[in-house]
Image (spheres, rainbow, N blue to C red):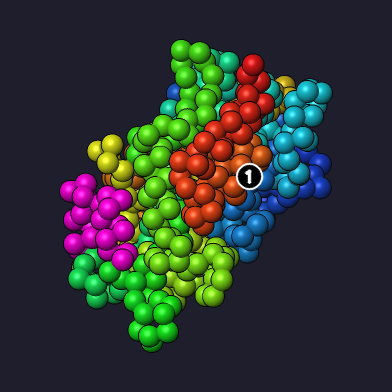
Amino acid sequence: MSKKAKILALLLAVMMIAAMFAGCSKDEPAETTAGTTAGTTAPAETTTQAPKNMGGYVFTLNNAGNFNPEGKWKDTSLGDELKALYAEIESTYNCTIMFTSLDNSYDLLLGSATAGTKYCDFVRIRQSTWIPLAVNHALRPLDGDAMVEAGLDVNDSDCFAQQYTHLTDFTVDGVEHTWGVDMSGKYDRMAFGHTYAFNKKIVADAGYSADAMYQMVYKYEWTYDKMIEIATKCTKDTTGDGMPDIWGVALDTDGNEIWTNGSGPIIYDSATKTYKANCLDSKVITSLEFMASLNQNGKLSPPFKGDGATTSRGDRRTLFYTGKAAFAGLYGPNFGDDGAPNGTANMTDPAGLLPIPKGPNVDHYTMNFVDVDLYCMLVSTTEWEKSAYIMARIADGLHDDEEYQEYLLEESLLSDQDAYKVLTEYLLPNGLMNIAKCSDNMYEITRKQFYQSVYEGTMTPAAAAETYQPLIQAELDAVFHQK
């Protein structure tokens, strides 16, 4: 039975069988619980084995986002579906599912792990938190035979989004583990990484149809030089005041261009089992030179200082949304109805999606994920086998790749089949977790200082690489406890 059919059956059962659900003979918890909906659920599907009895275990999911039925989907049909799904799990496996909104800061989570005091069963956190937690042995790896025996298999595509889950395949103490899981579908999902959106009308007026743009991608002709060539032709001063009215580029991709030439500013050295700064690599320098060319001191994108300066990233997005720029660096939340108030869904001109162009040293495109927000388990979850088992049952109901793909095409990408093809066939398979967010301080060093100095032209790419190489190495040594 498909997941959609299962949900429909659950909803019918909730309407038909009143007050049958008694959960786990529990007092009503103070937090939001899944079993507070009036009604019941259908019995579990017949299997060859009786379902496991969790003995009344109270499972807490912290920072669950739109998977919490009392959040965004409260008093909606999707909220009712979620309640029915959780109610079935509670009834079938004799447990209670709770949703909490506790502080998920690094210090509190590390304190829970160190003290051995349960904080929650799973918590959604991003890599600037889960990487240092993993390094400090505060997270339980989610791969391996023991987890599979407990009922959670990170490689189960029916439960977990494989491309996103395996962004957390990460080496600690010389051993790679999977540290988190993702469940993407119609209720909630992880945002895809940075791309370049393009205004189809502006590029067409400059002589490049949308079809021609996509054909460049498919032929792997969408390169650094090609983007600068087109952006230059799109930049126009129609009033004669010396300032462009239409910009070639409204916004960069937040530094993620640096990963598109076969290297990056941080690498893992398997020989020494250490993370190393790699800013002086010639491939990285080439990427930095492309990043510098996106602005050219106010020739292709609005200047950062002086007359006509537009420094806010939100203002630069608005330039693109309002038809004043050919290209803009955007990522998942800035496309479609889930994103910014004036996102691409509300543009007057049609928009498309392109990869960050590829550098001269590679034969493919790369997508870097800035915010890898995934569900992790602290080592202080002592009854981890029960926690793992229940989480997998929840994931089986929440994750649905078909529904996620429908969302991408119809809502995020505005039914643009070519944009969908670019994202799903050319970018997502080459996804990278942004290691430059291994800590909040590293993000400040790289994005706010290193990359920004290149974008603004306050330092040459070579000088910036030389300046920030030792700073990045020092932070890597601190985060990963490297001598």
Q: Along the line of sight, which residue is nearer the eye, 107 or 386?
A: 107
Q: Along the line of sight, which residue is nearer the eye, 171 or 416?
A: 171
Q: Which residue is found at the position 51% from the left and 57% from the top?
A: 456
Q: Along the line of sight, which residue is nearer the eye, 203 or 190?
A: 203
Quarter containing the N terminus: top left
Q: Which residue is found at the position 69% from the left and 42% from the top?
A: 62
Q: Which residue is found at the position 50% from the left and 71% from the top?
A: 318
**Magenta segment main secondary structure:** helix
Query: Which residue corresponds to mark 1?
Result: 444
User: Where residue 396 sits: x, y (%)?
Assistant: 49, 38
198 inside magenta stretch: no
- Regarding residue 62, the answer to whether it shows in the image is yes
Quarter containing the C terminus: top right
Q: Which residue is found at the position 50% from the left and 42% from the top?
A: 463
In this rendering, the count of numbered labels is 1
- Vertical side of 249 occupied by 34: above or below: above
User: Where residue 71 sits: x, y (%)?
Assistant: 65, 57
User: Where residue 194 sits: x, y (%)?
Assistant: 44, 51
- Span shown in magenta: 211-232
